Image (cartoon, rainbow, N blue to C red):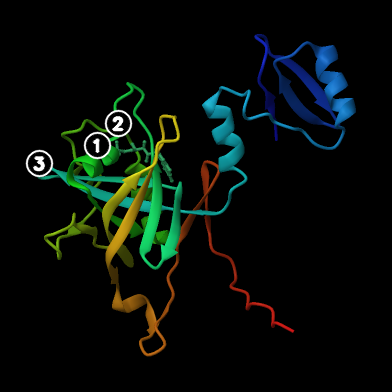
Amino acid sequence: MCFQIIGKEKPFHHSKKNKKFYCYEEPEVFRSRLLLTPSAMIFDLEKDTKVNETYKLMAQTIIPRPIAWVVTEDAGIVNIAPFSYFIGLSSSPATVLISVGHKADGTPKDTLANIRKHKKCTICMVEEKDLEKMHLSSKSLLREESEAQTFNIETTQENVEFPSRITSAPVAYYCELNQEIDLGGSTIPLVLNVRQMFVDDEVITDKERLTIAFKPVARIGKSYAFLGSEVDAPKMP
Ligand SMILES: Cc1cc2nc3c(=O)[nH]c(=O)nc-3n(C[C@H](O)[C@H](O)[C@H](O)COP(=O)(O)O)c2cc1C
């Protein structure tokens, strides 16, 4: 594993216990820092202006993250993209949050533009069998191009009030925009009210108890993970 310390202009390479470090400080400064903190590294995110580095640190440590496979629509074009800055916020009211950024040219990603315009989206959960299609759908296409068509992702329109859902997804949340949160950066957290939920019969294992089981995909850094074995909660004393 390699780390980067951000600050000065030129990178120097160091080796310590066979681990490779990349550093942007004078070697002596870097060594003294290692001596001060021999078994850990402190990253000052306030001073670190390189968003990419902060992303690396957070995306590899806040794990595993669920993936929201988000469907939006505009002018008849079905837009699909995955987002792993995604979390359930509350069950009462039913709300979730996704954080959506901007494209390289500085314009909002299509998902953000569509949610801002229509205030609606449909979030689908990703099963193992859909990993490849989900990943491909993260490709940045022209606004007038549909990921559904380009990557052959079948969608079903069962609720005309919301964008269609991905047919193979076991679970879908039909959402309405509650509010944007302005953090002062280019990534915009969106709070979404879940108005309706679709759960495929196939993944409801017990209708009376309402137990659901499916095979989700999680995000870990730039890779993915499948769920391991499920463990019962310890008994309370
Ligand atoms: C698994 C995965 C998770 C992602 N999570 C996010 C995220 O949380 N926020 C974000 O802005 N982009 C995220 N992306 C990148 C977007 O999917 C990508 O920028 C996509 O092109 C956006 O499409 P759109 O312009 O159609 O909205 C992720 C990509 C992948 C593959």
Displayed quadrant of residue 135:
top left
Label 1 element class: helix
- The answer, for residue 152, to whether it is visible in the render is no
Residue annotated with mark 3: 75
Under mark 3, the amino acid is Ala
Of residues 138 and 55, the one drawn nearer to the viewer in this rendering: 55
Q: Residue at x 81, y 24 (%)?
A: 15
Label 2 element class: loop
Where 46 sits versus 100, above or below?
Answer: above
Residue annotated with mark 2: 108
Can you say which quadrant of the picture contains the C terminus? Answer: bottom right
Density class for disc 1 (Cα within 10 Å; few <14, some 14-19, many ≥20) is some
* Disc 1 to disc 3, C-alpha distance: 12 Å
Mark toward the start of the polypeptide (1 vs 2): 2
* Disc 3 to disc 2, C-alpha distance: 17 Å
Say which mark, if any, is on residue 113: 1
Displayed quadrant of residue 215:
bottom left
Give x and y (percent) for residue 128.
43, 60
Ligand 1 - quadrant of the structure image: top left
Label 3 element class: loop
- Marks 1 and 2 in Cβ contact (< 8 Å): yes
Give x and y (percent) for residue 102.
35, 30
Give x and y (percent) for residue 68.
38, 53
Q: Is mark 1 within 8 Å of ligand 1?
A: yes
Taking the image as shown, residue 136 lies to the left or right of residue 150, namely right
